[in-house]
Image (cartoon, grey):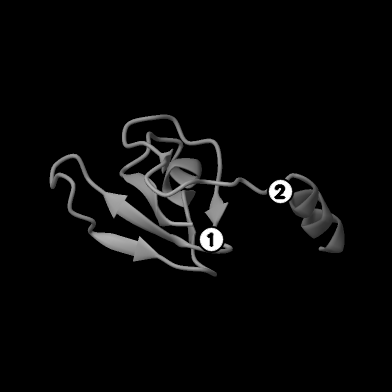
Amino acid sequence: TQELLELLIDDMFELDVAAGEAVITQGEEGDFYFIVLTGTFEVLLEQVGDVPIHVYNPGDGFGELALFHDTQRAATVRCAAS
């Protein structure tokens, strides 16, 4: 409904992130969903090391798994380019 959409929009805020900065860290509690407006974000797994397994671009979203499943973050996501 329009009312639910307005509630969602009211809770949104912009987060400025510098290249190299992590916005999600694997193993931490999840409390936000992110939508990429600009830049790129790399997905890293502790099991793999410092090699990105995926890249998020403008228009992509991430962070939903921990929210939907009430679990810890499954990966680290860091800004590759702002």
Q: Residue at x 74, y 44 (%)?
A: 11
Query: How many residues crowd mark 2 within 10 Å: few (<14), some (14–19), many (20+)?
Result: few
Q: Which structural element holds mark 1?
A: loop
Contact (Cβ within 8 Å) of mark 2 with mark 1: no
- Whole-percent x and y of residue 15? 61, 45
**On the rendered structure, is 28 left or right of 35?**
left
Disc on res. 36: 1
Q: Residue at x 23, y 59 (%)?
A: 53
- 2 vs 41, nearest the viewer: 41
**Would you place residue 5 above or below residue 64 in this image?**
below
Disc on res. 2: none
Q: Which structural element holds mark 2?
A: loop
Amino acid on which the number 1 mark rests in the picture: Val
Query: How many residues crowd mark 1 within 10 Å: few (<14), some (14–19), many (20+)?
Result: some
Q: Residue at x 46, y 49 (%)?
A: 63
For the residues marked 2 and 1, what is the alpha-carbon distance in whole angstroms?
13 Å
**On the rendered structure, is 79 left or right of 11?**
left
Res. 3 image quadrant: bottom right
Residue holding disc 2: 12
- Whole-percent x and y of residue 21? 41, 41
Name the image quarter holding the N terminus: bottom right
